Structures are given as C-alpha cells and as structure tokens.
Amino acid sequence: MTSLAISAPALALAPLCDLEGVLASIDTMAAQRPVAAQVVATASGDDASAEGLARILAGDVALAGRVMKLANSAFYGMRGRVTSLQFAVTVIGFATVRTMATVALTDLDDESRLPEDFWETSTSLALAASTLAPRFAERPQDALCLGLLAQLGVALLHHHDPVGHAELTAGARSFDARRAAEVQRYGISALRLTSVALEQWGFPAGMLVPLEQVGDLGSFSGALLRSAFEVAARIVDAGHEELPIERVSCGQLRERDVAPVLSQVRTDAAELRQALLA
C-alpha cells in the first residue's frame, strides 16, 4: 500500500486520521463488489477486450445496466442503438468502463453516504472537462473519466469524518481555501488523496498528474481540470466568486468561451448523473 507522508504541523492541528485505514477500507468495499473490482483490475490490461469485459460485467446487473444506459445517452450520440453489453463497452471505451466500476466499488453510487452536492458537482466537472478537452489537446473520453473520479478523495474523507468534513466544506467555499482546510485537518487534500488512491489501483500517470498540479496556476498539466472546476463551481455554487478564466486555463480560454460550455453542461448533467446512478 502506498505510504502517506503527513507533516508534524498538520498532525498537531488535525484530529487523528488514519489515512492508511481510509485507503484500506477501499479493499473491504472491493471485496463486497467483486465484479467491479475485477473490471478495475482487468480494463487496463494489455489483453483486455470488449468481449472479456462484457462477460465480467454481466455478473453485476446494476453495473452492466449503467454501462448500457451511458452508451445509449446523448453524450455518445447512440441513443437507443446500443443493444448489447459488448457493443456498449466498445462505445464508451475501456477507460470509462473502468471509471464506472471504480465508482461502484468505492460506494460513490450510494448518495446517502456522500456530501449533498457531490454528484451535481462531479457530473458538472466531468462534462466541463470533456467539453473543454480539445482546447487542451486532450481526449474528451479521458477528460470525462478524470472529472468523474476527481472527487473520490472528497468521498473518502466524508466517509471517514462526515460531520467534520461537512463543517469544513461549509466554512471553506473557495477551491484553494477548501484544499488548505483539508490539509490542516487531515494532513492531505482530497485531490491528493484521489491521486494516491488511483495510483494504488494502477491508473495511468496521465490521470494522476492533473490531480497533483491542479493547484499550480503556472502548470499547464493541471489547466484543464482547473478550468473544469471553475466551470462546475459557476454552475453549482451560487456564491462562487468567479476567477479569471484566462489565468485559470493558462491562456487557453477567454470568458466568451465559457458561456456555451455552461449551457452544454447544464443540459447534459442530469442525464449523465442518471446513467451513472440509476
């Protein structure tokens, strides 16, 4: 298991938080969702195939149904035309199947155990990242996966400390303030915890680097995810103080570029959420 280095000052200010235990709890969840865990382990392998993944997915009716529903959603332009699980895997791609399995095995599909706005934020974040991806020379499918999983650390911290994390979230509205408050309370930010968890499961470096550099305004590697967070905040948080999108995006976006993205995300978010959680 990946070791987490927690600074002495952070521990002095924070309640004891067994982050190794937080990550270990994921293994317990995986044991309860063996099909999802097998998909996560298999989807990135060199010998992965649509036929093989479909055969595994068939063992979890709920997860298979979500894959079918997403493949038939407006996002992929195949509404009503995907009639087999193998075809659905081909349509949405192995990375997205793996992402959906990760959502399942970490209990992200149980809204009763999550912050109230978790999925509203996550779907907005994912769709914003996917829509903006071409401007950053990234693939929309990969950006969708990154956006969907970016808040995994939020869920893990909330599972561990629901009352304390809710208070922290209410008191730190801005992105930077929330990250700083998480480090002070837990010794690690939610985004860093997401990166550690995904690294533990063998997700590619291309998904980890944006999570680690999103807070650095000078980093182009974090610019797409940083921009997606800004777009999502403008949709979800009525009290959000808008940041200059030119600065957030390392000059890749202008304010005139944001309005159509906001409209597209608002249009598609409800259907994506339903496909992922229904």
Image: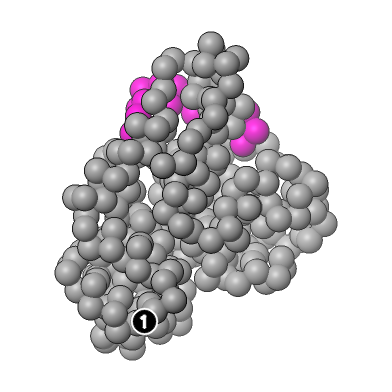
Tell me which residue sits at (41%, 42%) in the image: 1
Between residue 43 and residue 146, name the one nearer to us: 43
Q: Amino acid at mark 1?
A: Ser
Tell me which residue sits at (60%, 67%) in the image: 131
Q: Position of residue 95 (x, y in %)?
A: 45, 69
Tell me which residue sits at (63%, 52%) in the image: 210
Residue 81 colored in magenta in the image: no
Rendered position, 216 above or below 96? above
The kind of secondary structure the magenta stretch mainly shows is helix
Q: Position of residue 183 (x, y in %)?
A: 56, 26
Q: Which residue is mark 1?
A: 49
Rendered position, 88 above or below 202? below
Q: How is the image coloured?
A: one colour
Q: Residue 230 vs residue 70: left or right? A: right
Residue 162 occupies which quadrant of the picture?
top left
Is disc 1 placed on a helix, strand or loop? loop
Tell me which residue sits at (45%, 82%) in the image: 77
Q: Position of residue 199 (x, y in %)?
A: 49, 51
Q: Position of residue 132 (x, y in %)?
A: 65, 65
Q: Residue 179 vs residue 271: left or right? A: right
Residue span colored magenta:
159-178
